[in-house]
Image (cartoon, rainbow, N blue to C red):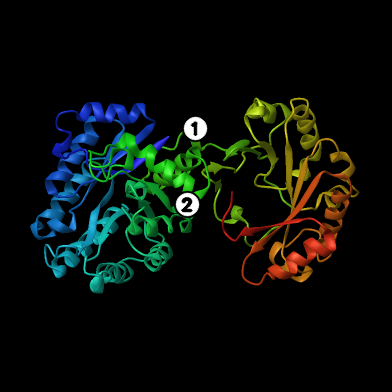
C-alpha cells in the first residue's frame, strides 16, 4: 500500500483523463491520494475532488507564489469551507519561495504566518513549501527565515511535512528537531546520460538521515516525473519508482518503504489505519521474517524503542496477547520464502523458551535457517543453562551486549538480575560459542560506549563476531 501525500489532480493537466489517472493509481496500489490546495480556487477544487472520490483527501492553502492574491477574506473563507468538509486533512501548501521574488518576501512571510495560525486553530498539520534563490549567495535565505518563523510562531513538535525537500543537511537537522516529517519527490531518480546530477547526489546523501517515522512519499504530480518518464506528465501511480529508489538508498525493500511511509501518512493526516497496522506476530523486513512472541523483557533499557513507539519499520509489535505455537506457525506459513527466521520482537524470546523450541523444531523439518536475537539472560531466566537445548535448532545467536562495562550495562540496560548480569551475559556468549554454529554480539554506537573496548571484548575475551548497531535506528 502506498499513499501519495502530495499531488495536484485538480490541475488542467488531468482534464482529459482524471478518472482514469485516479483509477490507475488505485490499481497500482496507491490507497490514498492527498490533493493539495495551492490557491483559493485550487483548494475549492481539491475539496470537490475529495468529495467525489473515496480515496482522495484534500488540503487547503495558497502557494507562496500566489501569496499576493491573499486578501482579508481568503483565510476566513478557507476556514469556513474546512469546517464544512470532513475530508480536509492539512493546511498547505504554504511557505516561502524566494526563487523568483514573486511576490515580495515580506508578503510571503505574512501569509505563511497567517496559515500557521490557521493550522493551529483547526488542529491540522502543515504542508510546507520552501525554495531558495538560484543565486547561491542568498540561497539559504528562505530556509533560514522559514525556520525562524516556525520557531517563533508554533511550539515544537510541529505536525507537518516539508514537501519536495531541497535543503541541505543543516536545514534537515533543524526540520527534524522541530518534529516535522520530510518527503522527497522523484527528482532523486534523475540521471543524465553520463552521470547523476550533483544536486540529486546531494539529496540522495540525505535520504538515510531521516528516521523511519518521519519519511513520507509524494509525487507532486503533474510535476517531477521519475527518470523513466522524465519530461512527461507525472501521476500518482508512478510513486512506485520513487519508493524503489528510496528502498535502494536505505537498504530495505519496496514493501518496507510502502509500509513505513503509509503508517506515517495515516498517523500524520489522521487517515484510516486498517488491518495493515494491527499487532504482528510475524513481520517481514527485507528478506527476513521476524517472530514477535512476547513483549516481556528482563532488561528495561533506557534506549529501547518500546519506550516511545509500538512500531518497527511500520510493523505494530505491541501484542494484545502472547501467541501459541499454532498461531506462530500459521503466521509464518512457508519458511522457504525467507532468507532466515529470526526470533526478535518487542521482548526477550527466551522467556518463552518452550514455544521457541517447539516452533524451531517444526521449522527445521522444512529446512529453515533460524536466528535468535537475545539479551543473553536465558540461563538467568530459567535458573540453569539453556544452551544445550538450542543445539540443532538455532543456527545463529546474536546477543545484545550493548555496552563495554558492567557499570554502564546496569545503568543503561537496567537488568532485572542486577549488577552481575553483564558478566553472566558474557558467560552465555562463551557457552553458545562452544556448541552453536555461529555467535555474535551487538553493541550500540551511542555516547558513552567505548567501541574500541567492545571490539577487544568481542575478539579477545569472547572470540566472536561484533556488529555495531546505530543508536536510535531499529530494524
Picture coordinates of residue 119, whole percent (x, y): 27, 56
Return the residue found at the far front: 194
Q: Sort mark 2 into few (<14), some (14-19) or many (20+) by Cα contacts within 10 Å.
A: some
Q: Residue at x 79, y 53 (%)?
A: 376
Q: Residue at x 31, y 43 (%)?
A: 219
Up-down: is 265 above or below 404? above
Return the residue found at the far bottom: 137
Numbered disc in front, either 1 or 2:
2
Are the residues flagged by discs 1 and 2 in contact, CB closer than 8 Å? Answer: no
Secondary structure of residue under mark 2:
helix
In this view, the residue in front, 432 or 272, is: 432
Residue at the spot of label 2:
213
Residue at the spot of label 1:
275
Location of residue 430 (image quadrant)? bottom right
Report, in whole angstroms, how far the alpha carbon at label 1 lies from the one at label 2: 19 Å
Up-down: is 362 above or below 439? above
Q: Residue at x 77, y 47 (%)?
A: 397
Up-down: is 354 above or below 427? above
Amino acid at each position: 500500500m502506498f499513499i501519495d501525500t502530495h499531488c495536484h489532480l485538480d490541475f488542467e493537466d488531468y482534464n482529459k483523463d482524471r478518472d482514469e489517472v485516479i483509477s490507475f493509481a488505485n490499481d497500482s496500489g496507491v490507497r490514498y491520494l492527498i490533493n493539495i490546495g495551492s490557491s483559493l480556487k485550487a483548494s475549492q477544487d481539491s475539496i470537490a475532488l475529495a468529495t467525489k472520490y473515496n480515496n482522495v483527501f484534500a488540503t487547503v492553502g495558497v502557494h507562496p507564489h500566489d501569496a499576493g492574491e491573499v486578501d482579508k477574506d481568503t483565510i476566513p473563507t478557507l476556514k469556513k469551507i474546512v469546517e464544512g468538509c470532513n475530508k480536509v486533512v492539512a493546511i498547505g501548501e504554504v511557505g516561502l519561495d524566494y526563487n523568483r521574488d514573486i511576490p515580495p518576501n515580506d508578503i510571503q512571510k505574512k501569509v505563511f504566518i497567517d496559515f500557521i495560525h490557521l493550522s493551529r486553530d483547526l488542529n491540522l498539520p502543515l504542508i510546507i513549501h520552501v525554495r531558495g534563490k538560484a543565486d547561491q549567495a542568498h540561497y539559504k535565505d528562505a530556509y533560514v527565515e522559514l525556520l525562524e518563523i516556525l520557531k517563533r510562531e508554533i511550539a515544537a513538535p510541529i505536525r507537518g511535512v516539508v514537501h519536495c525537500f531541497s535543503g541541505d543537511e543543516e536545514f534537515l537537522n533543524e526540520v527534524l528537531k522541530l518534529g516535522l516529517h520530510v518527503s522527497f519527490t522523484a527528482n532523486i531518480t534523475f540521471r543524465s546520460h553520463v552521470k547523476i546530477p550533483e544536486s540529486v547526489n546531494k539529496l540522495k546523501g540525505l535520504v538515510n538521515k531521516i528516521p523511519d517515522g518521519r519519511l513520507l512519499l509524494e509525487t507532486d504530480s503533474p510535476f517531477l516525473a521519475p527518470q523513466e518518464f522524465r519530461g512527461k506528465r507525472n501521476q500518482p501511480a508512478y510513486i512506485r519508482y520513487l519508493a524503489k529508489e528510496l528502498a535502494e538508498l536505505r537498504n530495505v525493500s519496496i514493501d518496507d518503504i510502502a509500509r513505513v511511509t503509509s503508517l506515517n501518512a495515516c498517523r500524520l493526516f489522521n487517515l484510516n489505519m486498517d488491518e495493515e497496522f494491527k499487532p504482528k506476530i510475524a513481520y517481514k523486513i527485507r528478506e527476513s521474517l521476524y517472530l514477535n512472541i512476547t513483549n516481556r523483557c528482563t532488561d528495561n533499557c533506557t534506549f529501547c524503542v518500546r519506550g516511545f513507539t509500538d512500531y518497527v519499520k511500520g510493523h505494530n509489535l505491541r501484542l494484545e496477547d502472547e501467541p501459541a505455537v499454532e498461531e506462530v506457525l500459521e503466521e509464518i506459513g512457508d519458511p522457504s520464502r525467507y532468507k532466515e527466521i529470526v526470533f526478535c520482537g518487542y521482548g526477550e524470546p527466551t522467556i518463552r523458551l518452550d514455544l521457541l523450541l517447539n516452533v524451531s523444531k517444526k521449522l527445521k523439518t522444512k529446512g529453515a535457517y533460524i536466528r535468535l536475537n537475545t539479551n543473553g539472560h536465558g540461563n538467568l531466566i530459567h535458573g540453569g543453562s539453556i544452551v544445550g537445548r538450542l543445539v540443532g535448532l538455532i543456527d545463529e545467536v546474536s546477543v545484545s551486549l550493548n555496552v563495554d562495562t558492567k557499570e554502564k550495562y546496569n545503568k543503561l540496560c537496567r537488568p532485572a538480575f542486577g549488577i552481575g548480569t553483564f558478566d553472566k551475559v558474557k558467560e552465555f556468549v562463551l557457552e553458545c560459542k562452544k556448541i552453536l554454529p555461529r555467535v555474535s554480539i551487538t553493541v550500540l554506537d551511542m555516547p558513552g560506549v567505548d567501541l574500541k573496548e567492545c571490539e577487544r571484548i568481542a575478539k579477545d575475551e569472547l572470540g566472536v563476531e561484533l556488529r555495531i548497531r546505530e543508536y536510535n535506528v531499529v530494524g
